[in-house]
Image (cartoon, helix red, strand yellow):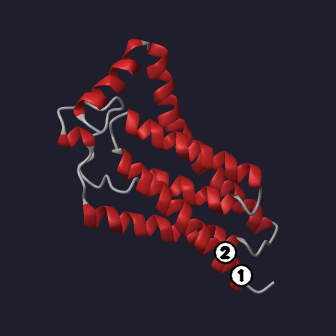
Amino acid sequence: MTLAQYRKIHSWFQEKPWRMTLLRLMYKGLPGAIYLLYPAAALVLLFSRDRRLIAFLAVPAAVFGAVTVLRRICNFPRPYEAMDLTPLIPKNTKGQSFPSRHCACGAVIATAMWPLSPALGIGVALASLAMAVCRVAAGVHYPRDVAAGLLLGFGCGWVGTIIINHYLPV
């Protein structure tokens, strides 16, 4: 995205205070909701002695670790670093923009939720997509960052969950 595109998006949000309020709520609330739901579901699996707990914990942990390493290797700048842009949500992190870890984690958690409850999986997937839009709109990520995070999370999540669940003893 160009500086002019970011400025146009920022102006749209800043025209109406309720838009900024909604952006702030979604920016903080969506990851918070996903990250509260995940351990709650893990506890349900633990207490019900469900063998899927291994994949439920291992796959998101592996994706989180891989994305963290990839971000450090790539160390791409964020939009507000590369352009004369103040993010709509205050942030001063330098680099490590690609891929978006929030989006990757949300997507992989959606894939982990799917076998437990397709409705929860779809809900978390939709929340992850909304989170991606918020992060770009706020000016803290480029579209490529959130797209890569979502692709890594959904792709690795599905493959990892299928493989682990296939090889676990019944």
Crowding around mark 2 (Cα neighbors within 10 Å: few <14, some 14 to 19, many 20+) is some
Using the image, determine if residue 21 lies above or below residue 64. Answer: above
Question: Decide: marks 2, 1 in contact (CB < 8 A)?
Answer: yes
Q: Which residue is mark 1?
A: 166
Mark 2: secondary structure: helix
- Could you tell me how far apart the alpha carbons at marks 2 and 1 are, in whole angstroms? 6 Å
Please state the total of marks drawn on the protein image. 2
Q: Quadrant of the C terminus?
A: bottom right
**Which quarter of the picture shows residue 87?**
top left
Residue at coordinates 28% horizontally, 64% vertically from top-left? 72
**Three-letter residue code for mark 2:** Ile
Q: Is residue 64 left or right of residue 76?
A: right
- Please indicate whether residue 115 sits to the left or right of residue 61 in the image: right
* Residue at left offset 78%, top offset 71%: 50
Which mark is drawn over residue 162? 2
Near-viewer residue (90 or 19): 19
Query: Looking at this view, is 92 or 115 the one in front?
Result: 115
Horizontal and vertical percent position of residue 133? 46, 38
